[in-house]
Image: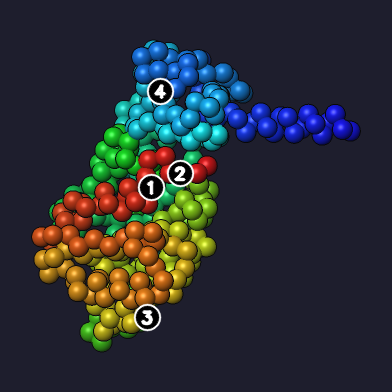
């Protein structure tokens, strides 16, 4: 028994002095390049097959922190940024080597028992989705799906360009890959996105819309696509009325969403009721912004200040941007959507 205990201690001690990366990719052979040990940026070191589709490379902690990238034997490096591993860390990575272009698929006819209607989902699948079947992804849910990916379907002829922006940020190593679920709006957009009840606009069906997302859309997405369904990997974001919907839904369901973006949010709604009743501190990181050109900046600042008063901290769980010269339109939102995307999903930030 003493020998067994001693062996266990020695194994644990040995493991504590080895930094390990497990590379999940189905290839006949795989190598690594980097800046420490047998790796260099000009000479590759062979990774060892751990099991089918998993390659392991280990180096002593004494070498310190390491930057590395996987490489195929034909010389292709993985797309995106370098992987930075702290000494003693153990990490799983899921690289890809093909073109950095995701694709958008349409899913029509998603019925809502909560709202007694139906709508389409427009789902952006990231570049590696077909190439690396072992990988699962964080998910960003967005409202006004018609406006996200295609100018032809956008309300005012201009799209957010979410797919192009995510492709670019992934390719340059500033953002992790994500699935983006665009939820189309309906003729009932105003009531569906709002709490009750604005004196001029009415509204008040947001709880039913929230139930649609929570009980219908998210379960459908999680069972249909390779998602990371936990709260740490799930975000929600929208603009205008979709901004207040995102803040509202995340504050009501922090067990499902850990990140929420309110872009040019309509905090004027119902005499600034959401500002007066700002969410109490919950474990959600909120991104808020507004443009300086007739875009509700004053109300957004008031919401920021109300949340700070509830214990949110600038740069920690609250990120506020006043976009100079920006207006209330898709062109302005497209120009700055990289800010919430890289804050929510920084390169290397996903935990599997």
Crowdedness near tag 3: few (<14), some (14–19) or many (≥20) residues, C-alpha within 10 Å: few
Under tag 3, what secondary structure? loop
Residue that appears at 40% across and 23% down: 35
In this rendered view, identify the residue nearer to me: 53 or 303: 303
Give the labeled residue for mark 4. 35
Q: Are marks 2 and 4 in contact (CB under 8 Å)?
A: no
Q: CA distance from mark 2 to mark 4?
A: 23 Å
Residue that appears at 75% across and 33% down: 9
Dot 3 or dot 4: first in sequence order is 4
Q: Is residue 293 toward the left or the right of residue 183 in the image? A: left
Under tag 2, what secondary structure? loop
Q: Are marks 1 and 2 in contact (CB under 8 Å)?
A: yes
In this rendered view, identify the residue nearer to me: 186 or 252: 252
Give the labeled residue for mark 1. 345
Crowdedness near tag 2: few (<14), some (14–19) or many (≥20) residues, C-alpha within 10 Å: some
Residue that appears at 31% across and 53% down: 340
Dot 3 or dot 1: first in sequence order is 3
Under tag 4, what secondary structure? loop
């Amino acid at each position: 028994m003493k020998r067994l205990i001693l062996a266990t201690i020695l194994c644990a001690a040995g493991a504590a002095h080895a930094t390990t990366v497990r590379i999940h990719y189905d290839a006949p052979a795989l190598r690594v390049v980097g800046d420490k040990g047998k790796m260099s940026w000009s000479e590759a070191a062979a990774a060892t097959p751990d099991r089918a589709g998993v390659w392991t490379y280990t180096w002593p902690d004494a070498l310190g922190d390491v930057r590395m990238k996987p490489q195929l034997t034909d010389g292709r490096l993985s797309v995106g940024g370098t992987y930075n591993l702290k000494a003693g860390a153990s990490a799983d990575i899921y690289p890809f080597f093909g073109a950095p272009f995701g694709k958008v698929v349409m899913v029509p006819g998603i019925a809502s028992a909560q709202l007694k209607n139906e709508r389409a989902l427009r789902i952006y699948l990231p570049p590696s989705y077909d190439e690396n079947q072992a990988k699962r992804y964080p998910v960003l849910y967005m409202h006004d799906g018609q406006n996200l990916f295609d100018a032809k379907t956008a309300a005012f002829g201009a799209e957010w360009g979410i797919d192009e922006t995510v492709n670019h940020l992934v390719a340059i190593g500033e953002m992790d890959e994500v699935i983006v679920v665009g939820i189309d709006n309906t003729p009932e957009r105003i009531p569906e996105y709002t709490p009750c009840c604005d004196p001029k606009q009415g509204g008040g069906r947001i709880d039913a819309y929230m139930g649609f997302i929570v009980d219908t859309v998210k379960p459908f997405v999680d069972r249909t696509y390779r998602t990371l369904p936990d709260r740490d990997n799930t975000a929600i974001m929208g603009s205008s009325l979709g901004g207040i919907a995102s803040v509202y839904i995340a504050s009501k369901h922090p067990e499902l969403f850990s990140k929420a973006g309110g872009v040019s949010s309509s905090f004027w709604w119902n005499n600034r009721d959401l500002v007066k009743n700002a969410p109490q501190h919950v474990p959600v990181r909120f991104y808020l912004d507004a443009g300086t050109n007739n875009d509700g900046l004053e109300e957004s600042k008031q919401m920021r200040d109300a949340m700070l008063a509830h214990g949110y901290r600038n740069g920690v769980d609250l990120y506020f941007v006043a976009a100079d010269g920006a207006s209330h339109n898709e062109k302005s939102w497209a120009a700055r959507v990289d800010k919430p995307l890289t804050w929510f999903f920084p390169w290397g930030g996903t935990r599997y």
